[in-house]
Image (tube, rainbow, N blue to C red):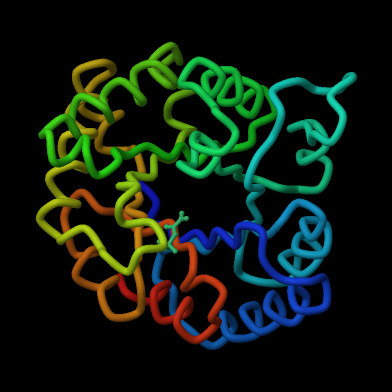
Amino acid sequence: MRKQIVAGNWKMNKTFSEAETLITEIADALDDVDLKDAEVILCPPAIYLEMATDVAFESNFKVGAQNIYPEDSGAFTGEISPLMLKELNVTYCIIGHSERRKYFHETNEFLQRKVDALLKHHIRPIFCCGEVLPEREANQHFEVVKKQVQESLFHLSMESFLDVVIAYEPVWAIGTGVTATKEQAQEMHAYIRGLIAEKYDGSTAVETTILYGGSCNGKNARELFAQPDVDGGLIGGASLKPDEFLQIATSF
Ligand code: PEP
């Protein structure tokens, strides 16, 4: 059965000492909770990944990066490769976040290369997709998400696709305090699962973890995660607050 996941996207936050404190607090708290079968992933800024994987070695969470460049090495000043992450025991990587699409102009085609570069090193992509508000208001949200998923993921073989985690993140819900309703989240997650079933098969669709992201917090996580096609969350702001993040991680 597919994995339930709560992943914390720290974005560009925390100094090294603050990051160390936060990771340690979360690791300690995880020792005392029952996650059932859920997996917790922390995605701190890249320069804290080694510290995070050191702590994770003796704790109950996995570590994800927030970005990679889709080459193993080369003249790409400032970039980080999946090969480097692999050696650090980083097992997940967020790609296609709306902030990277917006500020760094990442296209579906470029994200396809990132997916391939990660899978080559057995790092699981957490592939973000989602519509902006005018697209939802124009009732184009299904088409937008379909195009993102098709153009970045549907070149994969069935076997490779099974290593991908999808995160549906309506852009209008990210960092705004406006969460998608449980009905809106369920409707889109079921739609994405349907696309996967059509492209691959029913069992691939059933096995794919689809997370919800966008102003998910300690109060709304339980009702969102209770939806049949919502398998957990990608958490931004609330992942920086250990108590709230733990509350979300135990909301299954
Ligand atoms: C995100 O940036 O992936 C996210 C879900 O942010 P927030 O939870 O703050 O809306």
Task: Locate residue 59: give its quadrant.
Answer: bottom right
Q: Total marks drawn?
A: 0
Residue 26 appears left or right of 182: right
Residue at screen point 26% across, 32% down: 205
Q: Can you say which quadrant of the picture contains the C terminus?
A: bottom left
Residue at screen point 82% across, 71% down: 16
Task: Locate residue 219: give its quadrant.
Answer: bottom left
Residue 113 appears left or right of 206: right
Rendered position, 124 above or below 240: above
Q: Is residue 210 visible?
A: no
Residue 129, image x, y percentages = 37, 37
Rendered position, 211 above or below 68: below
Q: Is residue 251 visible?
A: yes
- Which quadrant does ligand 1 occupy? bottom left
Residue at screen point 54% across, 88% down: 32
Rendered position, 75 above or below 59: above
Looking at the picture, tell me which residue is in the foreground, 163 or 24. Answer: 24
Residue at screen point 39% across, 39% down: 166
Rendered position, 231 above or below 190: below
Residue 183, image x, y percentages = 10, 55
Residue 147 appears left or right of 88: left
Residue 43, image x, y percentages = 62, 57
Looking at the picture, tell me which residue is in the foreground, 239 or 107. Answer: 107
